[in-house]
Image (cartoon, rainbow, N blue to C red):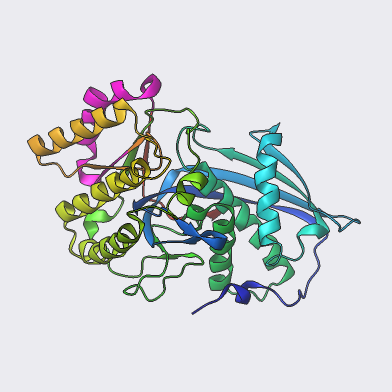
């Protein structure tokens, strides 16, 4: 079992004065949901996600050695503009990861970041953003320590991303990623995400995800607060056990290609996530009336056409419509005919399974 201490470097063999790296990292959508965490961003239950392809963050990290090593020093640009209100989150992230990257106070950093999707669209930009930043920081560490193996590089990048945003650890690799200890997935870890190691049927290759932007406003409850409400939740323990059971079932489903069983688990997981929010204290509802309209329309369409389209939800109002590639034409026509009217300004984003972070 790998421990976090194994990611603390002893020394570096090279020195680097200045330079830059640029990485893109995608968002991801969980099929088995992570909700509730322990100290240090450790998940209360395992999760599994599809890595997305088009919804991503592109981050350029420039760095230059500085004389004063007393504090962190960085500028933050979002889509070319100074973004002061993002800085506290980055400051907190650097404080959390300093033990693993002891060079952080030696450099002044300029973090220049942009998303390929609208900010606050309800797509997990913290996941893609923190993953992209972690990849850049690991590229600098690899320059300081060129002997580093690829396995170590990606595991540590995922671990660092997790300390910025839990689900970010699932945005480093593709296409199906597991995060959290799970008995039947021997490589799995609470510390970082791993590529799903078992067979995946052709039915799930190039799976499609069309994201319906129901409500692009800021959430009334942050994910951090929501996770914390699981500590005294009356149904928490049963929920955590259910996640393990559903992940076990998905192993067989991914191998057999059974879309009917896949749909049952994915939709049940989405509704369970929101049920946990509705039954916490304080309780809250992140779905909007249009979320429910879309869900009912998907159920009706699936029932009438037998096309294996389903939905999942993040901790928000937007709906991810999931479907196999060979049904794309019919599902997109259904979305245009019946679902676009429920989207804010008619907006939706077409995405699909992708391969994880990329050096640009």
Q: Nearer the viewer, residue 46 or 113?
A: 46
Left or right of residue 306: residue 197: right
Position above or below: 138 against 145: above
Judged by its main secondary structure, the magenta piece is helix
Residue 345 belongs to magenta span: yes
Position above or below: 345 against 251: above
What is the residue that sits farthest to the bottom in this orientation?
A: 1
Left or right of residue 43: residue 93: right
- Residue 54 lies, in percent from the top left, at 44, 42
Left or right of residue 221: residue 341: left
- Residue 134 lies, in percent from the top left, at 61, 56
- Residue 360 lies, in percent from the top left, at 59, 51
Residue shown at the point (22%, 23%) measured from the top left:
337
Whether residue 216 is visible here, answered yes or no, is yes
Quadrant hosting residue 150: bottom right
Q: How many marks do you count on the picture? A: 0
- Residue 101 lies, in percent from the top left, at 70, 65
Position above or below: 7 against 134: below
Q: Which residues are magenta?
A: 320-347
Residue 178 belongs to magenta span: no
Q: Nearer the viewer, residue 291 or 74?
A: 291
Residue shown at the point (62%, 72%) measured from the top left:
7
Q: Nearer the viewer, residue 307 or 92?
A: 92
Whether residue 83 is visible here, answered yes or no, is no
What is the residue that sits farthest to the right in this orientation?
A: 67
Q: Nearer the viewer, residue 6 or 19?
A: 6
């Amino acid at each position: 079992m790998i421990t976090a201490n194994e990611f603390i470097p002893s020394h570096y063999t090279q020195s680097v004065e200045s330079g830059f790296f640029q990485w893109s990292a995608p968002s991801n959508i969980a099929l088995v949901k992570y909700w509730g965490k322990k100290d240090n961003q450790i998940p209360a239950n395992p999760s599994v996600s599809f890595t997305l392809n088009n919804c991503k963050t592109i981050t350029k990290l420039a760095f230059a050695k500085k004389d004063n090593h007393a504090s962190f020093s960085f500028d933050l640009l979002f889509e070319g503009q100074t973004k002061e209100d993002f800085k506290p989150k980055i400051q907190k992230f650097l404080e959390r990861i300093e033990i693993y990257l002891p060079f952080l106070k030696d450099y002044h950093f300029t973090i220049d970041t942009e998303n390929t999707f609208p900010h606050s669209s309800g797509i997990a930009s913290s996941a893609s953003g923190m993953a992209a930043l972690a990849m850049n920081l690991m590229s600098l560490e690899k320059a300081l320590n060129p002997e580093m193996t690829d396995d170590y590089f990606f595991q540590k990048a995922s671990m660092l991303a997790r300390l910025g945003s839990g689900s970010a650890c699932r945005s480093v690799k593709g296409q199906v990623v597991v995060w959290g200890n799970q008995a039947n997935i021997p490589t799995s870890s609470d510390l970082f995400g791993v590529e799903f190691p078992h067979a995946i049927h052709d039915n799930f290759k190039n799976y499609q995800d069309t994201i319906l932007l129901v409500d692009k406003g800021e959430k009334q409850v942050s994910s951090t607060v929501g996770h914390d409400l699981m500590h005294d939740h009356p149904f928490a323990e049963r929920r955590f056990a259910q996640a393990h059971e559903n992940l076990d079932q998905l192993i067989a489903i991914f191998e057999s290609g059974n879309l009917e069983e896949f749909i049952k688990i994915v939709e049940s997981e989405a509704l369970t996530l929101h049920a946990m929010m509705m039954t916490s204290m304080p309780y809250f509802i992140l779905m909007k009336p249009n979320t429910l309209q879309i869900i009912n329309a998907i159920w009706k369409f699936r029932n009438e056409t037998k096309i294996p389209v389903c939905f999942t939800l993040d901790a928000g109002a937007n709906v991810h419509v999931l479907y196999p590639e060979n049904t794309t034409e019919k599902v997109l026509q259904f979305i245009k005919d019946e679902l676009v009217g429920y989207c804010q300004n008619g907006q939706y984003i077409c995405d699909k399974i992708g391969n994880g972070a990329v050096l640009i």
